[in-house]
Amino acid sequence: MDKSYNFYLKVNLNSYMGEWVAICNQKIVSHGKNIKKVFEESKIKCSKERPLITKVPEKETMIF
Amino acid sequence: MTITFRYKTIKRPDGTSVKTPSIPITLFGKEVIDTIGLLDSGADISALSKEFAEVLGLNITGEKTPAFGIGGKVDAVDTSMKICIAKGHEKYNFIIPVKVILDDYDFPVILGRTGIFDRFIISFNQQQEKVYLKKI
């Protein structure tokens, strides 16, 4: 996961706010509001590597 | 040993930015998902959205319990999950309790105090945009 995490730290995600993004092979391979679709699509596109899947927050996340 | 992670900066279209103390984690249910967890010292317990928990394959058929947050009261299910926090040669696997929030509010994985902050001494350096985790 190290390569995907390092890519995540560097990449500009502002156009994905509010969406789930999937990263593998140092690129965003899937994104969207529906995590199930993003997860399934990324599993197909990242056959040799487990994708890093995370939500890009729209605003500060404050709960509990 | 102490492991260090950098904050993630997300620039907004309006020119402002949000900096989050988030760390890479691997979560284990019926599926295994590499994701990013937001360290939240204000959260009593870790939390997942219902959609994320379903994709991970956690059992969320347990009794509904109320959870209270900034947005008010919501239904939740208490469960647990295995988590791995790793960097370099350091790797820590353990099981933590987690609340699965049942409403439609979708949010990143929240890492709260129970199970996380009692296993590590966690220090936030907001100025340097780094977070440090020292295993207790």
Image (spheres, grey):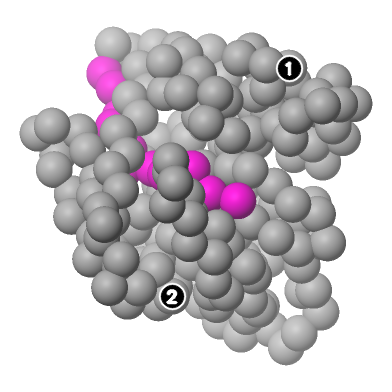
Q: Residue at x 40, y 77 (%)?
A: B114
Residue B21 x/y as whole percent: 31, 43
Residue A12 x/y as whole percent: 45, 12
**In-image side of B74 versus A63 (left or right):** right
Q: Residue at x 83, y 61 (%)?
A: B30
Q: Residue at x 41, y 15 (%)?
A: A10
Q: Nearer the viewer, residue B96 or B107?
A: B96
Q: Amino acid at mark 1?
A: Val
Quadrant location of residue B53? bottom right
**From the viewer's perspective, is residue B100 above or below residue B23?**
below
The quadrant of the rendering that contains the C terminus of chain B is bottom left
Residue topped by disc 1: A29
**In-image side of B2 versus A51 (left or right):** left
Please give the chain letter of the residue carrying mark 1. A
Inspect the magenta stretch and tell me whether residue B39 lies in it: no
Badge 1 crowding class, 10 Å Cα cut-off, few under 14, some 14 to 19, many 20 or more, is some
**In-image side of B52 versus B97 (left or right):** right
Q: Is residue B108 visible?
A: no
Residue A4 x/y as whole percent: 57, 25
